[in-house]
Every structure is written in structure tokens, then in C-alpha cells.
Amino acid sequence: MSDDWLKKVNWSEDGLVCAIAQDAISGRVLMVAWMNREALKLTFQKSEAVYWSRSRKKLWHKGEESGHIQKVKQIRLDCDSDVILLQIEQQGGIACHTGRESCFYKELANGVWVEKDVVLKNPEEIYRKPENES
């Protein structure tokens, strides 16, 4: 299969595209991340979300540490070809590293950010370091 479809994406100057992960059933936006060509190609091939970590400067298979893999049901490209929408099934019901369903858990109310969603699992339980690491 040809990779010509990757050429249709309007990549930023640094070779990235914004990617939105949306729950395929509820429609809730769970997170926003970045993808480079390799991440998008791997996401398509694996049917699991792979992103580009800008802070770590490496590919990041969502759930590689937490087990909260995103099974990709559909990949869409917006009208300007510069945003990817992933319709996903979130394994474990947790997309956010804070242990919540969604990264969008804060709501602006009366000029103050209020945490509206509960923590489903303590992040320390999700991201345990091996005993030989400290």
C-alpha cells in the first residue's frame, strides 16, 4: 500500500500535526497530542494511537507505560488538512496522566479553573517506577 495519503496532511514547519483523541461512543474529547509522519503511519498500521512527544523528542505509543492503550476506530483529517481526529476506544477508561477519563477536566467558572472530573486511579499506581529506579 502506498503512503501517498501522508502527503495530503498539511504538516507544520517542524513536521508535526495536531491530533485530537475523541471517544468513539460518547464523543468526549479525551486528549490532544502531536504526531509526526511516523507516528501517524504507525497509528494507521497498528490501529492504536502513537504520538510524538515534543518534550521527550520521541515516539510515544499511548499506554506503553500505563496500559491505557487507545484502540483507533477511525482516523479523520479536517478541512485544512492540519488536524487529525482519532475516534478511539480508550482502554481502562483513563486517557489523562492525572488518572482521569479526559485531559479536559478543568472548567472555567466565575474566573477560576475548577477541577470537575474525579481521579479514577491514582497516577502513582498507574506509573510505578521499577524498584531499581528512584
Image (tube, grey):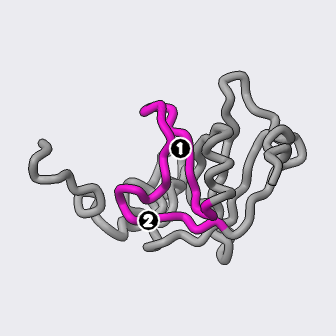
Q: Which residue lies under the disc numbered 1?
A: 111
- Magenta span covers which residues? 46-72
- Is mark 2 in CB contact (under 8 Å) with mark 1? no
Q: Quickly name the residue at label 2.
A: 68
Residue 67 lies within the magenta run: yes
Question: At numbered mark 2, what does the secondary structure look like: helix, strand or loop?
Answer: loop
Quick one: which residue is furthest to the front in this view? 1
Who is closer to the viewer here, 37 or 31?
37
Q: Where is residue 110 shown, x and y percent of the image? A: 54, 49
Residue 7 in the image, given as x and y percentages of width and height: 83, 38
| Residue at far bottom of view | 25
Q: Is residue 53 above or below residue 45?
A: above
Q: CA distance from mark 2 to mark 1?
A: 33 Å
Is residue 18 found inside the magenta-colored segment of the image? no
Q: What kind of residue is marked 1?
A: Gly
Q: Position of residue 134 (x, y in %)?
A: 12, 42
Position of 84 with respect to 89 (left or right) is right
Q: Residues within 10 Å of mark 1 (few under 14, many from 20)?
A: few
Image mark for residue 39: none
User: What residue is at 63 percent from the left and 57 percent from the top?
Assistant: 21
